[in-house]
Image (cartoon, helix red, strand yellow):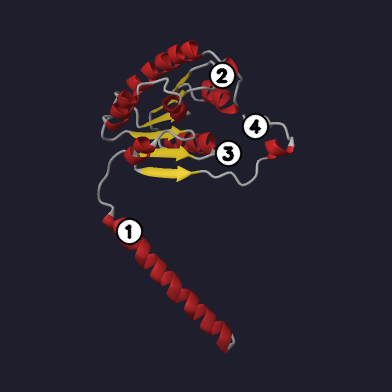
Amino acid sequence: MTDMTAQKEKSHQKKMEKLKENIDASIESASLERGVCILLTGNGKGKTSSAFGMVMRALGYGHKVAVVQFIKGEQLSGEELYLRDQCPQVKFYQMGTGFTWDTQDRSGDIAAAEKTWAVAEEALADKQYDLVVLDELTYMLSFKYLDKQRVLNALQNRPFEQSLVVTGRGGGSELAELADTVSEVKEIKHAYNEGVMARKGVDF
């Protein structure tokens, strides 16, 4: 080993020791154990995919999971097929009206949203659920299909140990403030904009 290589190795080791020290300190300072609220937002692809990754993670530990999807439901999706066929223990509910820009029926969409929210609200009040996923809930707030304060109250007052994932663009600053973790998925490029069709098993 040359002197230069040895110097690089020593420098790398010091950097990693410092990094480990910082990480260990962060872990040690996190002493509060409770459920968390995660908001996955932004205009990029992958918010629902990330949420379902957490569903798989929770199921790996034998946790009880509820998934409520707003907006989606007319077209079958891979996650729906998998959960219905392979994970009957998961409470799974879809609003079933499809995209609101397709229905163009505000009163009908509001009625469907309220019916779906009743299912979500029940799961949020049930301490048997370790994880609740509310997919595309943000649109219901942006379009004012649901009473914002009622939604925020239910999210805030859920059982202490229950974790929650909310997905969708927007949703307002109050939702972001309520969440413990907020991640923004940013679009850099999207195949759809180049005329590439949505692909089964990747996009739905």
Of callouts 3 and 4, the N-terminal one: 3
User: What residue is shown with label 1?
Assistant: 26
User: What residue is shown with label 4?
Assistant: 201
Query: For numbered disc 3, what is the local secondary structure?
Result: loop
Count neighbours of disc 1 (C-alpha within 10 A) and say few if under 14, some if 14 to 19, many if 20 or more: few
Q: Amino acid at mark 2?
A: Gly
Label for residue 98?
A: 2
Quadrant in the picture for the N terminus: bottom right
Of callouts 1 and 2, the N-terminal one: 1
The percent coordinates of residue 96 (x first, y second) are 52, 16
Judge left or right: residue 90 versus residue 193.
Answer: left
Mark 1 and mark 2 residues within 8 Å of each other at the beta carbon = no
| Nearer mark to the viewer, of 1 and 3 | 3
Question: Can the viewer see residue 100 in this picture?
Answer: yes
Which residue: 52% across, 84% down? 7
Q: CA distance from mark 2 to mark 3?
A: 18 Å
